[in-house]
Amino acid sequence: MRTLLLHLHQDPLQDSLHAWATSNPEGQALTPSLQAGRDLRKALSGLGKTVTLTQLARIALRGQGWRLLPAGDRQTLMQDLLAGLPLEYLVAQRERPGTVEVLLGLIGELIRADLEPSQVMGVAASPRERDVARVFEAWIQAMKDRHTFDAVSAEYFAARHALVTPHAYLAHGFAHFDAAQAHWLDSLLGEGSLVTLPYREGGLGLQRTALSVADLEQRGFKVEHLSPSRSRLVGPQVVRDYVQGSTVTPLPLTCAQLPDIEAEVRACLRQVRTWLAAGVPAERIAVLTGNEDAYLGTLADVALEYHLPLISGQQIPLRSTPLGSLLMAWIDAHEQGWRYSRTRRVLTHPLVHWPADLSLSARRLQRTAPAGLAVWGTDLEWLALPEVTTWPDAIRVIERLLVEGGVRQRAGAHPALNAALAVLVEELSGWAGRSGEVDSVEILAELRELLKTRTVLALLSRSGVRVANPLAALGRSFACMWVLGLSDGLFPRRTGDHPLVDQFTRQTWAAAGVNLPDLTVLAAAQEDLFLGALAACEQELVVSRPRRDLGGREVPAGTYWRRLGGDMVPLPSLDWGSEAEKLTQDALAGRSLSHAIQLKVETEQGRGEGVPSPHSGQLPQGIAVGERTWSPSQLHSVGSCRFRWFAERFLKLEEQVDPDEVEDRRASGTLLHAGLEGALTGWQAGDRTETLITRAKAAYEAKERELLASGDLRPSPLWQVTKQEQLETLERAVQSADFLPAAHTPLHLEDWREFTVEAGQYRYQLRGILDRVDETPEGLMVTDYKSNRYVSHVNRSGKNDLEIQLPLYMLGLNATNGRYFSIEQAQNLKDAAGPHAESPRKKYKWSAHRDDVLGFLEEVGEALGRGDLAPSPDVDGKACQYCSFAAVCRHTVSLDAAEGGMA
């Protein structure tokens, strides 16, 4: 007889477990993990070996000559299958990035559901479903032909192809079994076997366990329910009230809400330090999270600050480590032809330290962004692999990168880096024996695949407090546990429809007898794993949630938090985890600090309160505007926000942009301006429009050659298309009636001018390029070319609505009128200056415009004269939306700044 024993916690199971161990001294126990097996052996003296269900399946398959398919080979196999299958729906998708991953995930679901390819093919109705069935059938057949299994399919193939003799086993610590596991159990467990599951009929959160109970009962297991009893342990008490729908608190359960994930992690690890100080062994403490992606990074950073060792079984790809990041940058540089941005990423990577300081070279080369390694001024050309090389030579280049870049030296002091380096070296040693010439593209592709498929531990330590997900905590015993992240979307994680087999399709298949778990079942599986993990806590249990996620967005309480009751219990006052944290909290609380720290605190408080200081742009002495030479663009900058001008002009700050990824509008504008200048160079009355167009295109071509030679123009692969579009734009602009009206005579083209403008007591020396000055019957007309229709304005009286460029030129040249001509729109823009812009239908008056500009210049002179360079954006926050200096500015814009809100 095979027995399925059901109870919510293991206290009442002890007698049954001891009895089974006594009657089966050589019997093996099946547990969810190796650690769960160790805990079970401690609890049951005399118990034989423990092994995981997956381990036993792998052992059985290897005995039949099967082998494990490496993770990287899974990708290759799927790509090969897709290339050879006659597909319908997936024809266009088979080459897309991500298709292989999506299909492998779906294959995993089908395997865990223990489905046969013929079953799926029998219910596949649409082209999409038929393609899924074809891929599944081909995958299963390929695995059987190769006698291979992967991490997902060991139980699936063992149940079908492993020759095993059923024995008496104990299966304990599981929350549920998927269909493939249940099939394998059915094949493996003989008479006298005992399986336990935490279950109470009708219990909240146990729907997935109920499916496993029904499955095993259908397979012939005798179901026995133990009589309900109250556990003396905290975790089982919490689980019992949870499944009954009772309010858990005020049981020995602490529920804490923290402002954000970092505050939550800090509170958690301070409590962990307290438990350790109280004598609780590190291996008896667990930090539980159902979202390792959101928490592991913060846990690692705070644990390092607290000098607190953490361990985790979570594996991350080698490419997600700093070493992997460096090698991925090196691969990308090859694939992008050592473009400037890719080369800079390799040479200035935080992990490397070259004998020569290359950061200055990076800044020097930023403007022209030349490709290649030679321009960096040091002997670095060895970094680039030849197009054809050998495996040993390629390995030597990688080793030289790691040695001369200082990576090997740093690895001696960083265990995590050393572990990643060891994995890399082990893999590269296997390449060294390969002979013959090889294309560098093949080497780089294989290295990329290696970085993607080989993994290292996310948290590396010889021993410490375990960070576990719910699956890793099943069957374990911990004295103390803290559960992180019980907010919506964090834990439980959201589940969504699969793009190939959605909820409706699964329901349709289920009606035909082919059961593939839907969203409800998948969510239920998360919940019973959560309850199984809670049951592992014996003495002290804390659950917490952040009010905001990593992106700063507010998140409501999650399902588990609400079902636990969620009554907040104040956390005990604990010692701070580090000296820096203590000083920060003392400062925030206004406690006594050392003189040096107090000065820093006062500085920070002053910054936050807007007290004038050099940090906020209040200089100890003023700036005399008459002692500087200004350009209209500088006045635009200071008029938009004085602090932005200060950061750019005085602090010399600049945003490091990727010149290969952003469109260089300056080069395009220069070419278009050159074309229009050329159209009117040598102009004579009576020139035909065709003549002007010919001149414009010739001038454009000449400027293009000049910019290419200087490196200021970096043509993209589609440059010829862009060039043709710009030449057509030039032609339309020259043909426009607004370009050269009949009464206009061009006098000056692209003319550098220095002039003076007086505003009250302030005298401004200005210098700038006038695109064009025409003689007209009304007087001189200043024309400024704009690529499109955008015209800069400055902030006066809180509104970013004052145009100053045309009035400045007009005042300096004693011109009568000014206009903006849009090259791409081939017409004058509505922004204009002078009497010519006045109209009975418009409120515009040139006299008022001129007075506003002079008033603006006086205000700038006064502000700079008193050293006031504090942030001065417009009330709508337009100046802040695309500001590069937000990181050093204390003026903040609210999230709805785009709609005009300011904070």
Image: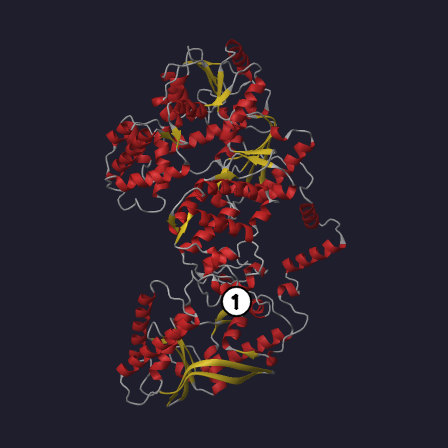
Name the residue located 52 percent from the left edge and 47 percent from the top edge. 323
Percent across and percent down for residue 45 are: 58, 15
Q: Residue 718: which quarter of the image?
A: bottom left
Residue 829 visible at all:
no
Q: Residues within 10 Å of mark 1 (few under 14, many from 20)?
A: few
Name the residue located 66 percent from the left edge and 32 percent from the top edge. 275
Give the vertical position of 528 relative to 403 (above or below).
above
Left or right, 814 with reference to 625: left
Describe the colour scheme in one phrase.
secondary structure
Q: Quadrant of the C terminus?
A: bottom right
Amino acid carrying label 1: it is: Arg
**Looking at this rendering, what residue extends furthest in the front direction?**
436
Q: Quadrant of the N terminus?
A: top left
Q: Residue 498: which quarter of the image?
A: top left
Residue 282 visible at all:
yes
Percent across and percent down for residue 717 are: 35, 62
Left or right, 428 with reference to 684: right
**Residue that carries the numbered disc 1 in the rendered image:** 364
Give the vertical position of 659 relative to 524 (above or below).
below
